[in-house]
Amino acid sequence: MDSKVKEQIITVRDTGLTNMFDTRTVQRIAHEMNFFELVLFIEEHKDKYVRFILTGEE
């Protein structure tokens, strides 16, 4: 996971619009914010995304 994706995750989280484990909604919000890297990252690496949400580790 690169720093751009991390920043995008944190930005979506900080909106408070969804539970970050609701990956479909996170992807929708990311798409609306033009965070296409995050949309693809969740699609391709959901396990790494969830680990980051749970632990803050990559």
Image (cartoon, rainbow, N blue to C red):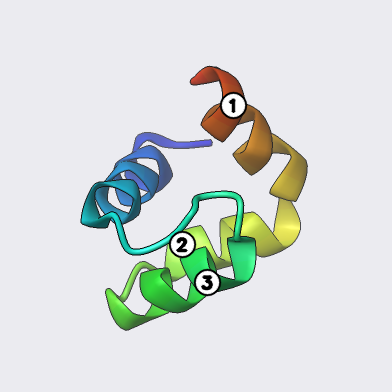
Q: Earlier in the sequence, mark 3 or mark 1?
A: 3
Q: Which residue is mark 1?
A: 54
**Percent position of residue 32, x then y:** 33, 82
Vertical comparison of 35 with 47: above or below: below
Q: Name the one closer to the observer, 39 or 25.
A: 25
Q: Amino acid at mark 3?
A: Thr
Tell me the crowding category of disc 1: few under 14, some 14 to 19, or many 20 or more residues within 10 angstroms, Cα based. Answer: few
Side of 8 relative to 58 (left or right): left
Residues at marks 3 and 1, CA–CA distance in whole angstroms: 17 Å
**According to the image, label 2 marks what residue?**
37
Label 3 CA crowd tier, 10 Å (few <14, some 14–19, many 20+): some
Q: Where, quadrant-wise, is the C terminus in this rendering?
A: top right
Query: Can you say whether 10 is above or below 28 in the image?
Result: above
- 56 relative to 3 in the view: left or right: right
Q: Nearer the viewer, mark 3 or mark 2?
A: 3
Q: Give the side of residue 35 with respect to residue 24, left or right.
A: left
Cα–Cα gap, marks 2 and 1: 20 Å
Q: Amino acid at mark 1?
A: Leu
Is the residue under label 2 in contact with that under label 3 (CB below 8 Å)? no
The vertical placement of 13 against 24, above or below, is above
* Crowd band around label 2 with a 10 angstrom C-alpha radius: few (<14), some (14–19), many (20+): some
Q: Sequence order check: which comes first, mark 2 or mark 1?
A: 2
Which residue occupies 45% across, 37% down? Answer: 2
Kind of element beneath mark 1 = helix
- The numbered mark at residue 35 is none
Percent of width and height locating residue 27: 52, 70
Residue behind mark 3 = 25
> Tag 2, which secondary structure?
helix
